[in-house]
Image (spheres, rainbow, N blue to C red):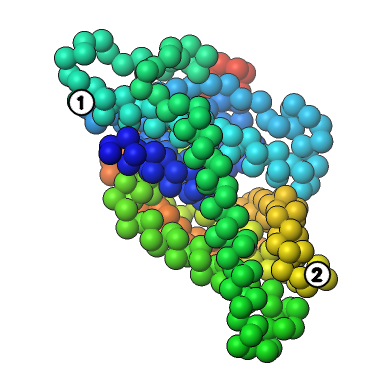
Amino acid sequence: MKRFKHDLRLLADLQLLPAMEGGEELLVGGQAVIEGVMMRSPHAYCVAVRKPSGGIVTKTGELMRPSERRRIWKYPLLRGLGTLGQALALGIRALRFSADVALEEENAARKPESGKPGALESGAPESGQPESKTEVSSWVLAANLVVSVGFFLFLYKFLPLFLATRLKHYFPAIENHFVFNFVDGVIRLLLFLGFLLAVSRWKEIKRVFEYHGAEHKVVFNFESRRPLTVENARTFTTLHPRCGTSFLLVVMLISMAVYALVPVHSFAMRFLVRIALLPLIAGASFELIRYAARRQGSLWASMVRPGLWLQKITTQPPSDEQLEVSIRALKEAMRLEEARGGEMVIA
């Protein structure tokens, strides 16, 4: 039963992954995971996880910017897809590490006499991680990913389209192409908001949202150039303009306009269009978030302000212990960044 609950929580965390992710390839960003935080710099990352026993375990690794791998990822729209693809892949890796730690701790609590300490050691590089018999298996992770993608397509593409189509029978005005896409978009937003409110009531997910708040506070602390300390991080807000929650909201708003410009009317074609245009919409949304984050106080920044309001659900005030984990993750990432020749700009 505990293993089933663990897998269910992993599924929920995977579904929330885009909302937890933040940052871009030129800046520091992070992501909340199970009882921890992943922080990344342009060329390094670190996942720090708090064990129930109180200790912090970390996992570090090196990165390359997508634009350093392929020149094509330097261009507008495409650079967003490259960065988002890398961020999601890294996020899944970080989430799996945190799930492995949680699973190992659960097994150790049930078998205290088993003797040997766990295989996950603080500061061990990714390539040096030994095999653990308590890790999340690849097929379980793959199954969770498939279910998560299917759930996303059903909840945010198929269901809004289906409900808007049904509403046409009761409200003839929805027959209009532009009105139809507006109603479809509103339903999508309501489903997104309802999903966030529902999962936020789950105690384990609330903990993830608290670590999400810790990640934002520490990123703000870093950007302020003040020393990275719990006391300094505590003074900052949990609402950050480069958050994945804001990104998802912008995606949904932009999609309403884009879908209205495509002259298709059958259910099947509308559904296919909604899937096919996802890369274009994601790339455009990335550019808007990127532009607005660098122009605070402008009209562009006010356009993404609703995403900040929505973060009042997906971020919660963290404890000092959670801030400590987030600071540990960022400092380890920046130390590796410095070792690779990057600039060490934190105290």
- Identify which residue is drawn at 74% across, 27% down: 68
Front position in the image: 138 or 21: 138
User: Looking at the figure, which quarter contains the N terminus?
Assistant: top left
In the drawing, does residue 290 fall left or right of residue 76? left
- Is 30 drawn above or below residue 61 in the view shown? below
Residue 323 seen: no
Q: Which residue is mark 2?
A: 264
Residue 52 seen: yes
The answer to whether the residues at label 2 and label 1 have Cβ atoms under 8 Å apart is no
Q: Which of the two discs, 2 and 1, sits closer to the camera?
A: 2
Q: Which residue is mark 1?
A: 109
User: Looking at the figure, which quarter contains the C terminus?
Assistant: top left
Element on which disc 1 rests: helix
Question: What residue type is disc 2 on?
Answer: Val
- Identify which residue is drawn at 17% across, 19% down: 112
In the drawing, does residue 208 fall left or right of residue 273? left
**Residue 103 occupies quadrant:** top left
- Identify which residue is drawn at 35% across, 53% down: 316
